[in-house]
Image (cartoon, grey):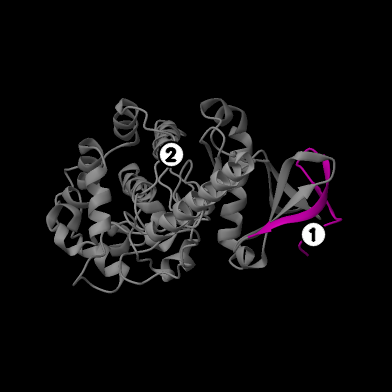
Amino acid sequence: MIPTTGNNVFLKDGTRYKIGPRVAEGGEGIVYEIQGKSHLLLKIYKSNKRADPEKWDMLRQKIEAFEAMHAGLSQITSDVCWIQNAVYYQHKFQGYIVPRVHGIKLSEWFTQMYNSQTMDEYAILNIARNIAKTIRALHNINIGKNEWPIIVGDLQPQNIILNEKNNHITLIDSDSFMIGGHECDVQLPTYISPERLQNPNRIRTCDEENYVLAYLFFHLFMFYGMVQPYPHKNGPSSHEECVKLGFFAYTQNPSLIDPHCVDRWNALSAEIRELFKRAFHDTHPVNNPSGQKRRPTPDEWYNVLAGLPQPGRIQRPSGPRHTGYPNTVNQAAKQNGGGAQGSATTPPPTAPPTAPATAPATSPSADNEATGCVIFIIFIAICWLISQFC
């Protein structure tokens, strides 16, 4: 039996928590409030996560490992919603407790910003810096006798909470992290690396996650996920095939890219463009069969981003709606991960622009008529005054 609102769940030491109202639901579990603990949330796994007894037991071990390491992990970085405790119901593992994080998902922010047709360069730069800093801290951790780093695995906009006031970010869904040899078995399809497309069972590495990090940054800098790195004119219609080919048209043949996207690409600093080139072209397995070249690390990203000057707070494209914006979006990618994520191949459903409220313009002929009326009234008034004194 799976517990729900009103049931009591327990920690290993016997501490009891009463499940409160449902907050959210995903593919793997349901998130609840905890009565009397407004600063905490509880995730209870669905039946589909329990179908394979061996995988279910491995997940239990992973969550219990997080619980054992919680104090140490919290000191390394506070930018992760770390698992605090495993929870049990009727003496059986059910899920875990995490701190409650306030903000919106980065995927929702992407959609908001795209719909407002606003390029908030200040926010973009600082969000990227904060993400790079957090991933750097995780990759630098050494856990266990094999000195494993922590790899996020399912790094993507839906698993990042953004505080819009200060651009602070928090990674959530840490149960999918690869930690101490416990693998990550879930990932957004559009973020899968070329090498994992070729070999889905390969062990994740920091270099593979560096591809995912670059992919996330490409979405952040290039119209909030409305365009992808690899799709281009005359290329395969399948996103997966585009990734496998590794043809990065932004540096190889920009004429195959939407002009708005090329303009945006050229507006990025040379240092950022070079990091994207390394991530998507130079180190792609097609161009780097020996694997000797490495993708940009979080540390490299952070150093480049930290060295750039702070831009203005808000920048809007000039001219009519979509000037400076790509007028295309791939709806299939939205279904994969939510928010604004797509390619440059399919027209988006955009609402017609609303004309601003302005005062009606006055034509030159109307000005002349008004002037004539004023002169005539003045002439009549003068004639009346003369008649009074004569």
Contact between marks 2 and 1 (CB within 8 A): the answer is no
Between 387 and 179, which is closer to the camera in this rendering?
387
- Circle 1 crowding by C-alpha within 10 Å: few under 14, some 14–19, many from 20: some
Q: Which mark is residue 215?
A: none
- Disc 1 target residue: 4
Residue 230: quarter of image? bottom left
Spot occupied by residue 155 in the image (x, y as percentages of width and height):
45, 49
| Residue beneath disc 2 | 314
Expressed as whole percent of the image width and height from the top left, the position of residue 44 reads: 70, 55
What percent of the width, then of the height, locates residue 333?
42, 66
Where residue 378 sits: x, y (%)? Answer: 53, 46
How dense is the environment of label 2, judged by Cα within 10 Å: few (below 14), some, or many (20 and up)? few
- Occupied quadrant, residue 45: bottom right
Considering only vertical position in the picture, is 254 above or below 70? below
Lateral position of residue 305 relative to residue 352, left or right: left
Residue at the spot 33% in from the left edge and 32% down from the top edge: 305
Element under disc 2: loop
When asked about the image quadrant of residue 57, the answer is bottom right
* Residue type marked 1: Thr
User: In the image, what residue occupies the spot 20% across and 41% down?
Assistant: 274
Taking the image as shown, residue 147 lies to the left or right of residue 286, namely right
As for residue 6 lying within the magenta part, the answer is yes
Q: Quadrant of the C terminus?
A: top right
Which tag is nearer the camera, tag 2 or tag 1?
Answer: 2
Q: How many marks?
A: 2
Q: Amino acid at mark 2?
A: Ile
Range of magenta residues: 1-25
Residue 376 in view here: yes
Q: Quadrant of the N terminus?
A: bottom right
Camera-side residue: 296 or 375? 375
The relative height of residue 200 versus residue 136 in the rendered view (above or below) is below
The answer to whether residue 183 shows anywhere in this view is: no
